[in-house]
């Protein structure tokens, strides 16, 4: 569905050349749902703008839905849906009118455009808002309308550029549910950009991590997290003055590594936190150390980014 080689984009700012995207290679198969994950300014949106023909590459080649983005941009646009960061809908129309008009722009006849609009309004829980002015929609409803507009012509490939940016947590969760359902029901390939770790983890079958305009990791969320060395166990003690003794206990746990003293306990990594827990509890008991709490955390995508770059993705935000 997407094949790109050495895709590059440079910008000239005054007397300085800025390389926003530095020669990336991408292959995305039909039916995949792929998230481009990275901090703001990493090159995610610039990459999407090149793949959607909104920005010409400085170097490299890309075919999208079977057509070259340089030679056949119109044919690419016919076959993709693109939902950008800003709202694409017009305040002066009713919701159903906006969708119908979008369908007519794509060459659908009147009957097909109305039927497809009604179908998408139902799929995206917007039927009750069909006769409401677009200007009166909530932020979450408006983003769902944007997605409906991108799907009106039944594209085989949909690009979502930070689809949940600016939404409250409940609206974000609702939108992600709709994206998963559309991927299943519409049988479309979905490419989205995000700097939300939970969003990439919850929605994407595959995550491409971009930093400073280059791809630094590519795989399923579980594959990427498996590269981080184990689960994180954090122990807090009832008596913080015994923290150094907890460090000694951690050193006696098989497979424990990256042992870090805490002000009120110790944190360390092990290969399998659930297997290590019973031995840890017994060792603390033998040492006469009373816990006030213990936490086991599986690696996150933020741990992956930290492992790859030495800094946290949250810090970038």
Image (cartoon, grey):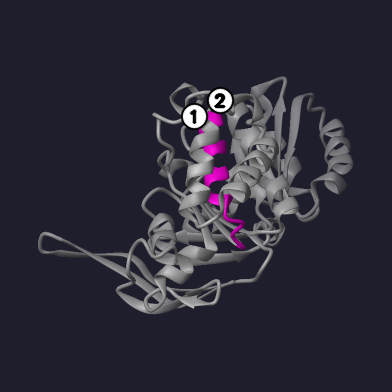
> Farthest residue in the left direction?
15
Res. 228 image quadrant: bottom right
The residue that label 2 is drawn on is 131
* Residue at x-position 52% and y-position 32%: 95
**Residue, x 78% and y 48% (percent of image)?**
252
Q: Secondary structure at mark 2?
A: loop
| Distance in Å between CA atoms under marks 2 and 1 | 5 Å
Query: Residue 172: x, y in percent?
Result: 59, 34
Q: Is residue 150 magenta?
A: yes
Magenta residues, start to end: 140-156
Estimate how packed mark 2 is, as few (under 14), some (14 to 19) or many (20 or more) residues with alpha carbons within 10 Å: few
Asked if the residue under mark 1 is in contact with the one under mark 2, i.e. CB atoms within 8 Å, the reply is yes
Q: Secondary structure at mark 1?
A: loop
Q: Is residue 194 visible?
A: no
Question: Counting residues from the N terminus, which is met first, the one under dot 2 or under dot 1?
Answer: 1
For this view, does 243 lie left or right of residue 4?
right
């Amino acid at each position: 569905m997407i094949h790109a080689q050495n895709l590059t984009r440079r910008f000239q700012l005054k007397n300085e050349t800025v390389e926003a995207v530095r020669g990336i290679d991408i292959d995305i198969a039909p039916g995949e749902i792929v998230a481009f994950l990275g901090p703001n300014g990493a090159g995610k949106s610039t990459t999407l703008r090149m793949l959607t023909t909104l920005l010409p590459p400085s170097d490299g080649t890309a075919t999208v839905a079977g057509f070259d983005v340089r030679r056949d941009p119109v044919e690419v646009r016919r076959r993709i849906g693109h939902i950008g960061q800003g709202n694409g809908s017009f305040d002066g129309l009713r919701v159903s009118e906006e969708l119908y008009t979008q369908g007519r722009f794509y060459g659908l006849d009147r009957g097909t455009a109305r039927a497809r609009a009604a179908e998408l309004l139902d799929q995206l829980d917007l039927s009750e808002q069909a006769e409401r002015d677009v200007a009166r929609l909530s932020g979450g409803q408006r983003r769902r309308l944007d997605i409906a507009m991108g799907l009106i012509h039944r594209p085989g490939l949909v690009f979502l550029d930070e689809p949940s940016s600016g939404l409250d947590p409940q609206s974000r969760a609702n939108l992600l549910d709709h994206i998963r359902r559309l991927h299943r029901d519409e049988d479309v390939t979905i490419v989205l950009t995000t700097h939300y770790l939970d969003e990439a983890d919850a929605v994407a079958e595959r995550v491409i991590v971009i930093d400073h305009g280059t791809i630094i990791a590519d795989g399923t969320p579980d594959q990427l997290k498996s590269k981080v060395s184990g689960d994180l166990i954090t122990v807090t003690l009832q008596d913080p003055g015994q923290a150094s003794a907890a460090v000694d206990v951690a050193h006696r746990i098989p497979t424990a590594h990256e042992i870090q003293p805490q002000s009120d306990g110790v944190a360390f990594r092990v290969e399998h936190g659930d297997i290590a827990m019973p031995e840890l509890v017994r060792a603390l008991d033998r040492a006469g150390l009373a816990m006030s709490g213990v936490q086991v955390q599986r690696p996150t995508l933020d741990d992956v980014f930290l492992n790859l770059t030495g800094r946290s993705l949250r810090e970038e935000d």
